[in-house]
Image (cartoon, rainbow, N blue to C red):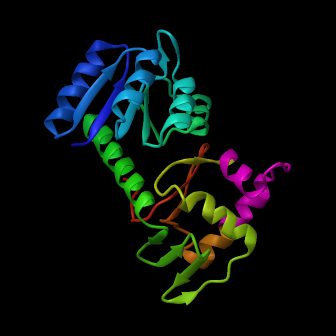
Amino acid sequence: MTRILVVDDEARITQSLALNLEARGYEVTIAATARDALAAATAEHPDAVILDLGLPDGSGHDVVVALRERCDMPILILSVRDGERDKVKALEAGADDYVTKPFGMNELVARLRAALRRHQRAEESPTIVTDHFTIDLDERTATVGGAVVRLTPTEWAVLDALARQPGRLVTQDQVLAHVWPGARHDTAALRVHLTHLRRKLEPDPSRPRHIVTDTGVGYRFVVGTAAL
């Protein structure tokens, strides 16, 4: 059974999440502090974590960093903070998705399921198949209709940064650091390479459905036709 670690110091929230997740067949472990969250993650090896940023003994951002150092599982932020700065900071720390309070339970569960599916696919195969093109991450090839698409090294680096985390929101800074490590970040150049990738891979580059932009935050590589 899939185990979810819920980290929040509001008993009302944790009780509601536990009831709803258990009704859907998940096992739930609850932690109310950063310290208890890390202890539970180490002892119980959850399949995913739902984490509030405002904890009584520390920052949720620090918990994300610590979790990423110990294990690899989807981390969904659930927070009242809805500012772009908090979202970017959490995603750069290693969170997979970000949901703001108040939230809809159906949306949260859908995002959780999507994150679990993405994690499972990433562990199973280096090949990603969409309805229009295929990517082999090990062979560094992309094909459309069976024909190899010629990508420049930089275009491949951009695609690689996104495709290795299918469905996950990747910040602009994370993509830039992956493509040009240690160099001055060039956001204009990144936009140009994204445009070229969409022209080569998307069925309709003017309305991309696989290499998509989350305005003001970053980008997602979507395998299907929707992010969830």
Report the number of discs: 0
Q: Nearer the viewer, residue 18 or 46?
A: 46
Task: Look at the image and tell me whether residue 197 can be seen.
Answer: yes
Q: Tell whether 167 sits left or right of 108.
A: right
Q: Nearer the viewer, residue 76 or 87?
A: 76
Q: Position of residue 159 (x, y in %)?
A: 62, 65
Is 179 left, or right, of 149 in this rendering? right
Q: Is residue 184 within the magenta segment?
A: yes
Q: Residue furthest left?
A: 23
Residue lying farthest to the right in this orientation: 184
**Residue at point 57%, 24% (across, down):** 62
Q: Quadrant of residue 89?
A: top right
From the viewer's perspective, is 176 left or right of 130?
A: right
Q: Position of residue 167 (x, y in %)?
A: 46, 54
Residue placed farthest to the front in the image? 43
State the residue at coordinates (83%, 48%): 182
Please provide the residue range marked out in magenta. Answer: 173-194
Q: Main secondary structure of the magenta part?
A: helix
Residue 37 lies, in percent from the top left, at 41, 22
- Would you say residue 37 sits in the magenta stretch? no
Q: Is residue 76 above or below residue 116?
A: above
In this view, which residue lies farthest toward the top? 56
On screen, residue 131 above or below 185 = below
